[in-house]
Image (cartoon, rainbow, N blue to C red):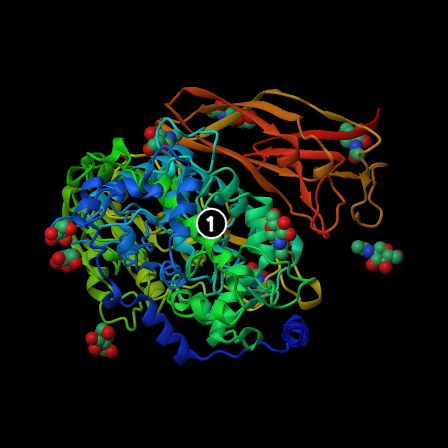
Amino acid sequence: MANIYSSFLFAYCVIFALLISGQARDISNRDIYEKLYSKLYHPDNVTPTGANFTFVCDPKRFSSLGLDVTKFAFCDKSLSYDVRANDLVKQMTLSEKALQLGDSNQGVPRLGLPKYEWWSEALHGVSNQGPGTSFDALVPGATSFPTVITSASSFNESLWLAIGQAISTEARAMYNLGRAGLTFWSPNINVVRDPRWGRILETPGEDPFVIGKYAVNFVRGLQDVEGTENFKDLNSRPLKVSACCKHFAAYDVDNWKSVTRFIFDARVTEQDMVETFNRPFEMCVKEGDASSVMCSYNRVNGIPTCADPKLLNQTIRGDWDLHGYIVSDCDSVEVLVDQHKWLGDSNEDAVAHTLRAGKSCVKYLLIPDNCLDLDCGSYYPKYMESSVQQGKVREADIDRSLKYLYVVLMRLGYFDGIQQYTSLGKKDVCSDEHVELAREAAREGIVLLKNINDALPLDAGKVKSLAVIGPHANATLAMIGNYAGIPCQFNSPLEALSQYGEVNYQVGCAQIGCGNDSLIPPAMQAAQNADATIIFVGIDLSIEAEGLDRNDLLLPGFQTQLINQVSGAAKGPVTLVILSAGGVDISFAKNNPKIGAILWAGYPGEKGGPAIADIIFGKYNPGGRLPITWYEANYTNMLPMTSMPLRPVDSLGYPGRTYKFFKGSTVFPFGYGLSYTQFNYTLTSTVSSTDIKLNKLQHCYSIRYGNGSFVPPCPAVRIDDLDCKDEISFEIEVKNVGARDGSEVVLVYSMPPEGIVATHTKQVIAFQRVFVPAGGSKKVKFVLNVCSSLQVVDYNAYSVLPAGNHTISVGDDIVSFPVPVNFQFS
Ligand SMILES: *[C@@H]1O[C@H](CO)[C@@H](O)[C@H](O)[C@H]1NC(C)=O
Ligand SMILES: *[C@@H]1O[C@H](CO)[C@@H](O)[C@H](O)[C@H]1NC(C)=O
Ligand SMILES: *[C@@H]1O[C@H](CO)[C@@H](O)[C@H](O)[C@H]1NC(C)=O
Ligand SMILES: *[C@@H]1O[C@H](CO)[C@@H](O)[C@H](O)[C@H]1NC(C)=O
Ligand SMILES: *[C@@H]1O[C@H](CO)[C@@H](O)[C@H](O)[C@H]1NC(C)=O
Ligand SMILES: *[C@@H]1O[C@H](CO)[C@@H](O)[C@H](O)[C@H]1NC(C)=O
Ligand SMILES: *[C@@H]1O[C@H](CO)[C@@H](O)[C@H](O)[C@H]1NC(C)=O
Ligand SMILES: *[C@@H]1O[C@H](CO)[C@@H](O)[C@H](O)[C@H]1NC(C)=O
Ligand SMILES: *[C@@H]1O[C@H](CO)[C@@H](O)[C@H](O)[C@H]1NC(C)=O
């Protein structure tokens, strides 16, 4: 063994050094990628669960198998989940254990343990993307809410919670009907670092705090069983369904100029890791109490995330105290061997390196502990037994992972049932209430980007004929994006607008790609003759998708020409509606006076059409805000997608990323969004300063200030050193001074004291969406923790509270006030 260790040590150090220096970076291989991609996601792989019972420890089920349930301690409800899971695992042989470590669990018939498929998805509605879920005549569809980027634009925490609750009700009902599992690998909470990323539609945007809040609400909506939200013992807290925060970590390159996620090595500073990439995951696990985390395909600083003990053991299990299991992205372990070719691992090495993260590798660098519990794929079931036989894995490590898995299934009622959900069934899927919530979510998320001279809303009494133009005018599938299921129904914009008058529909472009202008003349003619013109353009999954990053930020093909020519010809007012997840450089339309109004509808889900029509005709007053920066098209020429730093890289001329660090001009900034009414803010109360007393164990910490800046005598204190009990509280009165009822998103930012080098310009620290009737007003109170709201992550990756004058800015400086922080020694 000593020899094996030392040769491993040598190989590891050589390869590690190469990886760190970046020289061992693989080049892409599109063929392999294509093969993998189609293998992973080809619909032929989808098989129904076949589940046909309500709970494992049903005595009748056991007796039908010729077994006596009372003989199995793991079915004894008087014992703790921990003891029961231990009992179950102890009874399995090594081969039986190995077969339970893939997403497609084989079960153990002699113990009465049935098969279980762990892979189900519910990103914005129960999806059939994973093999654990299926639709057929019994359950033909489920409610398809707007894609996440659109729901996120509502900035409404109760909406996010309500969507999670509706989805888990449908999921539990489908489980009862044998059409879904109980473990759903959603939400996707990776930060949108770059506007080219193909998976922006799946995420809540670019701000780590907003993403974290989305995650907490959505996960609680999926998981929490009413009445047990504050259960003391988190290892036995009941779960409605199990959610999963993914993809950990620093994952946001899919396939850019042939750099695929399967070979990408994200070079990330600890500062960016703590401040940006980890933050939503930390909130998802700590505040959301998510019962699972998924590691990603990419490497971070040389190490595949699924084999990184620092990320998985130390951070997720140690620092954040996950109560649940860690799963790989699908076939990650295989990707580690075949694509990353990490450490030249054999299959057995790879399962050892991911399960226990490297004891056999370098003892002093990688202390053994728990990493990856479940392989979405077949490597664990295939190679775990031989890995144990080759001395690479201890059976005890397998036992620990299996226990994490079975405790989650016990918390889900998989073994004992959960009384309050047994009556859920067909009637609870696609219920009127859920379908209405999908429409409400779309209305709340749609963002009004331009509205000169009150071009919108249209007056239904005056507008008798409509020209409805463009390749997205009759959008159906495009509205539900990816990770969708089969929706209950579709209502396209065309169908919804047809209820308001006589419609002349002209597609204008044969497809989204819009390869020629042959269909533009009839569209111009329609606009010439109609009282009002509405143009639907944008992009879709052929341009931004999983496995497909964008090359530019422009509208494809002849779409720009379509917009210009049709609006030039139009007789009546012109409204432009954009369907996309990522931002589009539509400066030309913003500046075109013939285009009175622009709406961004994201991908608004199965009820997107009626939601858009509600807004266009004023049945709903839009209040959504952009959760991402809309950069100008030339942004993509300034820096490669693969450059990970959020801060500008002056030596390479790279501008910063996201509103926190990018200082250039934009098409529309983060947080932008108009209303049909106007709001005024008044600061009605505030605390003015924070004096923090330090004892002799609390120390001042030095942070970098620019030349010539005033540096306070005690410049900062590390957050770890503070008890962080101080609060900032203030109240804003929001007045609706316009003529229409409306909802306003109150966004609160903090800005650090001037002079600190390389810190964010500002950061979101709170937000609330409030409804205010015309002429009315509402007081919005904020009570914020000083440490979490004013913290800065310095270049050593410490979270610190700087002394000096911080600024709280509400609604992009509509109201702002200083918060001086002083440290005093007692
Ligand atoms: C359900 O299980 C029973 C007994 O295990 C079996 O006879 C029946 O065919 C199953 N039904 C379905 C729909 O799979
Ligand atoms: C794994 O976590 C455990 C518990 O937090 C800790 O004792 C151990 O040192 C960690 N191992 C690594 C490699 O960080
Ligand atoms: C709109 O799309 C639906 C669904 O794809 C299709 O059935 C319908 O014919 C389309 N309408 C028009 C006018 O093309
Ligand atoms: C324009 O594009 C359509 C759809 O791709 C195609 O059918 C048609 O032949 C093209 N027309 C010309 C003139 O290229
Ligand atoms: C990017 O484009 C905008 C608008 O066309 C222009 O104002 C700006 O100067 C350009 N920036 C760079 C760095 O070229
Ligand atoms: C809104 O507030 C601004 C600045 O405080 C003030 O000038 C303006 O009169 C207010 N508008 C209304 C309608 O109250
Ligand atoms: C600060 O001054 C030093 C010495 O004059 C200089 O080397 C450094 O570049 C300056 N830093 C900044 C941020 O201006
Ligand atoms: C937030 O969402 C909830 C749930 O859909 C809804 O009832 C409420 O009206 C929304 N709040 C605002 C201000 O739009
Ligand atoms: C903070 O602002 C106050 C009032 O404007 C000023 O007197 C004080 O010097 C400032 N403190 C720092 C550290 O800049």
Q: Residue at x 34, y 67 (%)?
A: 40
User: What residue sits 68% from the left and 76% below the top?
Assistant: 10
Q: Is residue 529 above or below residue 805?
A: below
Report the residue that reaches farthest toward the left. Answer: 137
Image: 358 above or below 325: below
Judged left or right of residue 571, residue 271 is right
Q: Secondary structure at mark 1?
A: loop
**Residue occupied by mark 1:** 205
Residue under the point 42% across and 37% down: 217
Quadrant housing the N terminus? bottom right
Front residue of this view, candidates 278 and 644: 278
| Residue occupying image coordinates x 38% and y 56% | 92
Reply above or below: 555 against 603.
below
Q: Quadrant of residue 128?
A: bottom left
Q: Position of residue 627 (x, y in %)?
A: 46, 46
Using the image as rendered, state which of residue 153 and residue 260 is in the foreground. Answer: 260
For the question of whether residue 258 can be seen, the reply is no
Towards the viewer: 628 or 423: 423
Q: Position of residue 826 (x, y in %)?
A: 84, 24
Ligand 3 location (quadrant): bottom left
Image x and y of residue 662, in percent: 60, 54
Label 1 lies in ligand 8 vicinity (Cβ under 8 Å): no
Instruction: Give the x, y percent position of residue 810.
Output: 56, 33
Q: Residues within 10 Å of mark 1 (few under 14, many from 20)?
A: many
- Disc 1 marks which amino acid? Gly
Give the total of numbered labels: 1
Say whether residue 515 is visible: yes
